[in-house]
Structures are given as C-alpha cells and as structure tokens.
Amino acid sequence: MPLDKAATKEPTFTLIDNRTGQNWNFPILSGSLGPDVIDVRRLYAETGMFTFDPGYTSTASCESTITFIDGDEGVLLHRGYPIEQLAAKSDFLEICYLLLNGELPTKVQKKEFWKGITYHTMLDEKLKSFYQGFRRDSHPMAIMCGVVGALSAFYHDSLDIHDPEHRQLAIYRLIAKMPTIAAYAYKTAVGQPFISPRNELGFAENFLHMMFATPCEEYKVRPKVARAMERILVLHADHEQNASTSTVRLAGSSHANPFACVAAGIASLWGPAHGGANEAVLKMLNEIGSKNRVPEYVKRAKDKDDPFRLMGFGHRVYKNFDPRATILRESCHEVLDELDVGEEPLLELAMELERIALQDDYFIKKKLYPNVDFYSGIIYRAMGIPVSMFTVIFAIARVAGWISHWNEWIQEPEQKIGRPRQLFTGATKRNFVPISQRR
C-alpha cells in the first residue's frame, strides 16, 4: 500500500498575520531529546518581522550535542550519560574528555589526556608578575578575568582557531592553568607566596594544595575533602546554554581567540544571578545568624509580601529537583563529619534549615528543595575557602563546558557571527537643533 504523500511531508509551523490574513510556513526541527523547534532563520526575509524573546528563554540559539537538561524531570545528561553515574564513577578530567570528544576515554586515552593537562599547569614566570599589579583587596574574579584574558599575550602558538592543533593546545592550557590562576588569586589576597603545581597530585588535590600549602608547611589533602572538591567540579562542568556558556559562544562567533572567549565567560559568570548564587547562600545564613531564628526566616520565606527569599532553594531550570544537589548532599555531610565542624554555628544553622525545608509541606509542595549552590557553599565554608573564591571555583569547573561549546561552535559548518535583533522603542528620525535654539 503506497504511503500517503500528505503524511510524509516535512512538519511545518504556520504563521498567520491576523492583520492581512497572509500566512507563512516554517520548518519544524526535531532533536534527539527535548522540545521540537521552529526554524525561523528565514523569518525576516519572508515576513519582514523579527521574533521578540527577552532573555532568549524560548529561543534555541544553536545546535549542540554536548549537554541535555530536562528541568521538569530533573534530568542532566552529558553526552547521554546521567550526571548521577558520572559523579559516582568518574573524575573531573574524564568529564572534560567526555565533553570535548563525545565519548568516555579508554585507559590509554585517559592517560594521554591526563598527561597533556598535567604538563600545562604552570604559568609563565612573567605572567606571575601580572598579579602584583592588582590591589590586595581585589576580588579574585576580577583577577581571573584579567589573567585569563592575558594568556593570549603569552601563548601565541595556540591562537589560530582554524588549526586543530592550536585549538587542542589552547584547550589543554585553559583546563590545566585555571586552578593555578585561581589559587594564585587567593594567595594574592592573603599575602602569601605562590605555590607551584605538583604533577603527582590529582586535579582537585592539586588545586587544594596550591590554595593552602605554604613554603613552611606542607598541606596534606584529606581524601574525603579531595573527593568532595572533585564532585563539585564534575557537577559544575557544564550546564547547557546558560548565560556564561552563551557568552563564550557569542564571543567565539566573532572568531576571537579562546582565551578571550573564556575571559568573557568568566565576566558573565561573575554576576550574582549566575555564578554568585552560592555566595548569596552564605550571606543569607549570616543574616539569619543562629539556629533559633530559622523558624522565623522560614515563616518570612512563605510570606509572599515579605521580600526575604531563601537562597539556595529551587532552581530556574529544574522544576522538580536539582539532580546535582542530591549527589552533593552526600559529599556535604561527609565533609562536615570528616572535618569535625559540628560546633561551627553557621554550618549547624545550614543543616537545621535543610532539615526543616525537606520536611515542611510548603517547600515540598512548591518543590523548593536545596540546590547545588546551597550544598557547595556549605562545603566551601567547611573547607575554609573564603566566600570571594566560591565563584572562582565554579569557573575552574565550567571552563570544561565553555571550551567544549567553543570548540563545537568553531567547527560548525553553518556558523555565523551572533547578531541578536531588537524591538526599537526610542525616538524616530528628527533633525539636529543648534545649541542656541534648544530649550
């Protein structure tokens, strides 16, 4: 029996102008997962109109094969692998390889990748003097923006974005040097000498060592603490087309070098609405002050007329639960037990807030569960990491996603420079008035 031709037509979306009755058909594209999309690339050419989508919340800005999120179901997949499995069985550098290459590495591939990253962890000696130009009270994210951007002035042999070998070298350097750059930013703030990276240490161990060791005292990284930091890095490695990743892609669309693109991503991440959320958690806990005041603040959080909001609860994307938070909760309690910080008032307060929120019908009904920012902030606090470094650690992890998306975008055959449109509501054309005639 022959197929019905009408049934085999490409699916289309019909746009009808109710002013004129004219209509246009636009193709509907389907991905492997997630909602279908309307292909509006010829919208302006055919209709003379643009779409209006502030924040791009209903716009697919690119085609990608890297990360998929289903916020309603609480699903996060990297190259198809559930984040729960990756966090339990993998490490950060393996996640980096997966995001970049699409597949988990073999033993040989992982060894070669580890070697490629490990032997690029040091910074040029002249770059170290760059830190001296910053005030001691400079925010570490300001230093990160400057130093990462400056990498392009030191590593001219990896700036040709069209050369695969240059791209790979730049990728290795960015992943490898971010912990060193971050640790040096911290040392600048506390007035201590820089500690060089150690090749025999793992990625998370090396970062903690550079943060806390001094020339007069070796820092021994506790396994559970290192594992918690490794999990934090894994859970923050990529999160689809968020603000900072979209910034890196947009900068990359102009064919800017990868160091400049990542510096742009760091600037975007710095915003309190994005990477600064775990800082906000600690500020909120400081405002509450003690366990005795938790019920008062929980009551305020339920009052729609009260401007107070519980930071670290709920998520813009995840409408059910944040799968990363479930994983990090275990690490959080492990670290608190390992470091024996039960007498720390702020951490006791956080645990009491978690207990109430997980049992309270209001939070359960609205699905306002503790998110990844809530637990990561508590872990950092227990480790002795200052609040100003929280977003910096986020950047160390997220560079894996940024550079993977940048690399994917650079190799996209139909890539175009990003050029969002606008709905202009300003003054129409008018004539210049000489200053003597203005009133």
Image: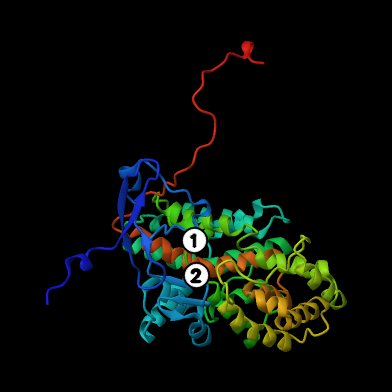
Above or below residue 27? Residue 352 is: below
Q: Earlier in the sequence, mark 1 or mark 2?
A: 2
Above or below residue 410? Residue 195 is: below
Report crowding for label 1: few under 14, some 14 to 19, many 20 or more residues within 10 A (C-alpha).
many
Answer yes or no: is residue 193 visible: no
Residue assigned mark 2: 238
Percent x, y for residue 263?
53, 56
In the picture, measured across the screen, residue 328 lies left or right of residue 64, that is: right
| CB contact under 8 Å: marks 1 and 2 | yes
Answer yes or no: is residue 32 visible: yes
Residue lying furthest top in this view? 436
Percent x, y for residue 273?
63, 59
| Mark 1 residue element | helix
State which quadrant residue 421 falls in. top left
Above or below residue 88? Residue 32 is: above
Which mark is on residue 245? 1
Report crowding for label 2: few under 14, some 14 to 19, many 20 or more residues within 10 A (C-alpha).
many
Please tell me which residue is depicted at 37% across the width and 75% down the height of the picture. 102
| Residue kind at label 1, given as amino acid type | Thr
In the picture, measured across the screen, residue 230 lies left or right of residue 376, that is: left
> Which quadrant would the N terminus be assigned to in this image?
bottom left
Q: How far is disc 1 from disc 2 in space, using C-alphas?
A: 8 Å
Percent x, y for residue 394?
59, 68
Closer-to-camera residue (32/397): 32
